[in-house]
Amino acid sequence: MAEREPWWTPGRAEQVIGTLLRTGVLAAGLTVMAAGGLYLARHGAERPDIHAFHGEPQDLRGPGGIVRQAAAMRARALIQLGLLLLIATPVARVALSAVVFALEKDRVYVVVTLVVLGLLLYSLLASG
């Protein structure tokens, strides 16, 4: 009787991680493009005020506010949501790598990857 190939192999891990990265970048790009079109449709005819700098509203300075405003279909928030998706893609890759290393029973890499993940999440979430 032939021995079955294990369901999780290093090659399979690379495929899953590659798919995650492609999907994340594609989702981010499509979100920004669609939201940019929505923004132009709503505000394209407005004249910009170039004499004064207007920063982002407080609602759009953190992930929670961005998600809330995007749920309300605010175009600027949807654009920033796409950018958050782009930022979240490599973070998700690090998280998935931790799972892969755990499946491979490589404790050293699991610990190192979790430390990196913690630092990434802290830097992302502590600012908002």
Image (spheres, helix red, strand yellow):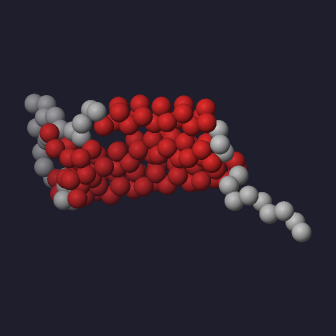
Left or right of 65 on screen, residue 30: right
Q: Residue at x 10, y 30 (%)?
A: 52
Position above or below: 33 against 116: below
Residue farthest toward the right in the current orientation of the protein: 1
Question: Where's residue 126, x and y in %?
Answer: 28, 33
Residue farthest toward the bottom in the current orientation of the protein: 1
Q: Residue at x 40, y 41 (%)?
A: 87
Question: Where's residue 68, x and y in %?
Answer: 20, 53
Left or right of 103 on screen, residue 39: left
Judge by depth and name the residue closer to the eye, 122 or 103. Answer: 103
On the question of residue 39 being in view, the answer is no
On the question of residue 31 being in view, the answer is yes
Position above or below: 45 against 113: below
Q: Residue at x 17, y 38 (%)?
A: 56
Q: Residue at x 13, y 34 (%)?
A: 54
- Please state, as top left, top right, bottom left or bottom right, where the C terminus lies in the image: top left
Judge by depth and name the residue closer to the eye, 97 or 3. Answer: 3
- Please state, as top left, top right, bottom left or bottom right, where the N terminus lies in the image: bottom right
Question: Where's residue 101, x and y in %?
Answer: 61, 42
Question: Where's residue 29, x and y in %?
Answer: 41, 51
How many numbered markers are drawn? 0
Left or right of 78 on screen, residue 94: right
Position above or below: 41 against 106: below
Judge by depth and name the residue closer to the eye, 6 or 71. Answer: 6
